Image: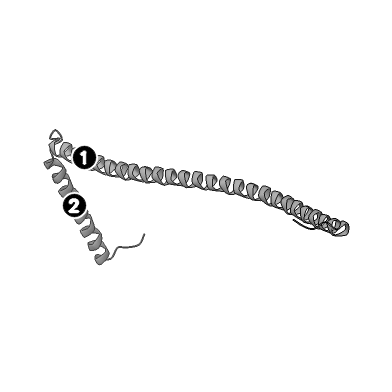
Amino acid sequence: MAKLSSTGFFVLLSMMVIGTVIYLRLWTVEADLDPTDTRIDRFMFEQAQSEALDEAAEWRKKYDEEVENSNESMQKLIEVTQTLEKKNQRLENLETRLKELQKENHGLLKDVAKLKQGMEDQKLKCEKTGIKEV
């Protein structure tokens, strides 16, 4: 086995002494605490519980506010969608009515053209037979 030098032995001995001192100090601190005295523990627990409840209430309030904002936004979106659908339906109705009126207008223009042609034919007939216009 290797021989320990005096410096190594001294370091090892001093480490053991320091460890023993720290252990005894921790033991005396623990002995000073009364295991039956739960007032400090109870107070700390109640304080932590109160803080946790406050934080939970704060987060619940934030959640409720976000839900309310979300519901308001959803309601506005539904209203806008319904309004848009109504306007689209009205536009479709107007387009249908415009097509109907255009067809009717086209038919009327044909009728006017036929009537004009008929008038012209009648004028020619009258001129041929010698009848004057009234």
Q: Which residue is mark 2?
A: 22
Say which residue appears at 20% left-offset and 59% top-offset.
14
Residue most extreme to the top: 36
Between 103 and 28, the residue placed more toward the observer is: 103
**Residue 104, horizontal then vertical, whole percent:** 70, 49
Say which residue appears at 36% left-offset and 43% top-offset.
68
> Would residue 77 be found to the left or right of residue 50 on screen?
right
- The numbered mark at residue 116 is none
Q: How is the image coloured?
A: one colour
Q: Which residue is mark 1?
A: 50
Q: Amino acid at mark 2?
A: Ile
Give neighbour class at mark 1: few <14, some 14-19, many 20+ (Cα, 10 Å).
Answer: few
Q: Above or below — where is 103 with respect to 36?
A: below
Contact between marks 2 and 1 (CB within 8 A): the answer is no
Q: Above or below — where is 2 with respect to 43?
A: below
**SS at mark 2 in the image:** helix
Between 98 and 84, the residue placed more toward the observer is: 98
**Residue 58, horizontal then vertical, whole percent:** 27, 44
**SS at mark 1 in the image:** helix
> Would residue 122 be found to the left or right of residue 74 on screen?
right
Q: How many marks?
A: 2
3D distance between C-alphas at marks 2 and 1:
36 Å
**Residue 10, horizontal then vertical, whole percent:** 22, 62
Give neighbour class at mark 2: few <14, some 14-19, many 20+ (Cα, 10 Å).
Answer: few
Rendered image quadrant of residue 6: bottom left
**Residue 122, horizontal then vertical, whole percent:** 82, 54
> Would residue 43 be found to the left or right of residue 73 on screen?
left
Q: Amino acid at mark 1?
A: Ser
Say which residue appears at 47% left-offset and 47% top-offset.
80
* Quarter of the figure that contains the N terminus: bottom left
Between 41 and 123, the residue placed more toward the observer is: 123
